[in-house]
Amino acid sequence: MSFKATARDIRGITVVDVSGRITLGEGSAMLREMVKDMTGKGQVKIVLNLGDVTYIDSSGIGELVSGFTTVKNHGGELKLLNLTKKVHDLLQITKLYTVFDVHNDESSALGSFHS
Amino acid sequence: MTSQPKRMDVTLESIMDSVDLAEDIILRIAEASGFDDEERHRIGMSVREGVINAVTYGNHQNRDKKVFLTIEMNNGRLVIRILDQGDGFVLADVPDPLAEENLLKSSGRGILLMKAFMDEFAVVRGRTGGAEITLVKKLPAAN
């Protein structure tokens, strides 16, 4: 299942529903371009809903990290929502679980942004 | 009676498509060997990361260079070797992705994942140069 992402705005916060594979090549590149595009438009409060992400490799993890840094450098926040066990385990192994703000439900993710 | 060792040799081009191909091959072998979903995922990802490293960092995507993938089953183990035709590398020289200063880097986690997902991981200099990664997973017990 290839990478797909659809964005929706909720009270000034961009929730991106991501599905498919975030891997070296197409998926990672599309994620990178998407975050770059959003920050370029001033959308710096971002929640990546990864509930339907079936697979992520180290390149995909790298793009999540790049996205986190990019958004932070633009004065914003990028948070993660609905991690599958596989993604959760990867973030644990790479110690990135302590870096990202991870949520299990959308309302708590939305409510966690600093004004 | 011990079973005969089984072996498959695959020569891969130094292109990104080889990553998906190698992963697909090992997933099919892992399934046929009786690994469960979680273990198949770990094995597949390990091979994926190993081939990415071989293609990208070993061979620098040079089409004149190959990646040699060897898959063997013997003595109750699945042994995977990935050999590139690059300059080789020293494991101790690879930055630790868990170090504070490296945590937010966008790359460098492949070896960490291979070590975490496989029972054994090793890197040696290939017989003709390059780096040879060895990944080992104990085969599931026969039903």
Image: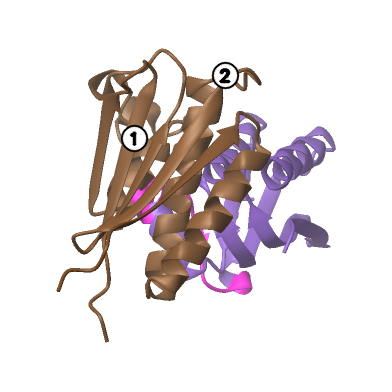
- Which region is colored magenta? A92-107
Residue A13, image x, y percentages: 74, 56
Q: CA distance from mark 2 to mark 1?
A: 16 Å
**Could you tell me if the residues under marks 2 and 1 are in contact, i.e. CB atoms within 8 Å?**
no
- Residue at label 2? B60
Q: Secondary structure at mark 1?
A: strand
Q: How many marks?
A: 2
Vertical placement of A2 versus A82: above or below?
above
Rendered colour, chain A: purple
Which residue reaches farthest bottom? B143
- Residue at label 1? B133
Tell me if I can see residue A112 in this picture. no
Residue A28, image x, y percentages: 67, 43
Q: Please tell me which residue is depicted at 41% across the width and 49% down the height of the picture.
A: B46
Residue B135, image x, y percentages: 31, 46
Label 2 chain ID: B
Vertical placement of B108 versus B59: above or below?
below
Q: Nearer the viewer, residue A62 or B49?
A: B49
Shown in brown, the chain is B
Vertical placement of B28 versus B117: above or below?
below
